[in-house]
Amino acid sequence: DPRGVYMCIQSGKSSPPLQVHYRMCQNCIEVDVPTISGIVVADVIATIFLAVAVYCITGQDKGRLSRASDRQNLIANEQLYQ
């Protein structure tokens, strides 16, 4: 804890006192190399999992035939639509 009153004493002379107020982080955590690498690996795995899930969900629509409700009926004999 670096808080306190400091004075510099040199050759029998002392400087005016200097009071230091230092606020320490109360909720800080130390981040080291294994922690950072774990976060990066977890992020890459989550991204790959999400990409595979999106591919599997969207890949099911390719083999499906169009439904009758998706087709437009054409007007026969040049009749105008009213």
Image: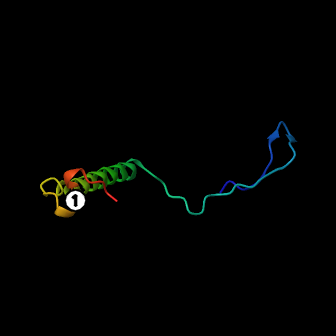
- The residue where tag 1 is placed is 70
Residue 34 at what x, y percent from top left?
Answer: 36, 50
State the residue at coordinates (24%, 50%).
78
**Image position of 50 (left or right of 76):** right
Q: Which quadrant of the figure has residue 75? A: bottom left
Instruction: Please state which amino acid type lies under the numbered disc 1.
Output: Asp
The image's colouring method is rainbow
Residue 37 picture location, percent across and down? 35, 48
Answer with left or right where residue 47 lies relative to residue 4.
Answer: left
Circle 1 residues within 10 Å: few <14, some 14–19, many ≥20: few
The one nearer the camera, 50 or 41, is: 50
Q: Is residue 82 left or right of residue 27?
A: left
Q: Dot 1 lies on which element?
A: helix
Quadrant of the drawing holding the C terminus: bottom left
Residue 79 location in percent, x, y?
26, 54
* Identity of the residue drawn at 30% across and 55% down: 46
Q: Quadrant of residue 61?
A: bottom left
Assign the N terminus to one quadrant of the image: bottom right
Nearer the observer, 78 or 3: 78
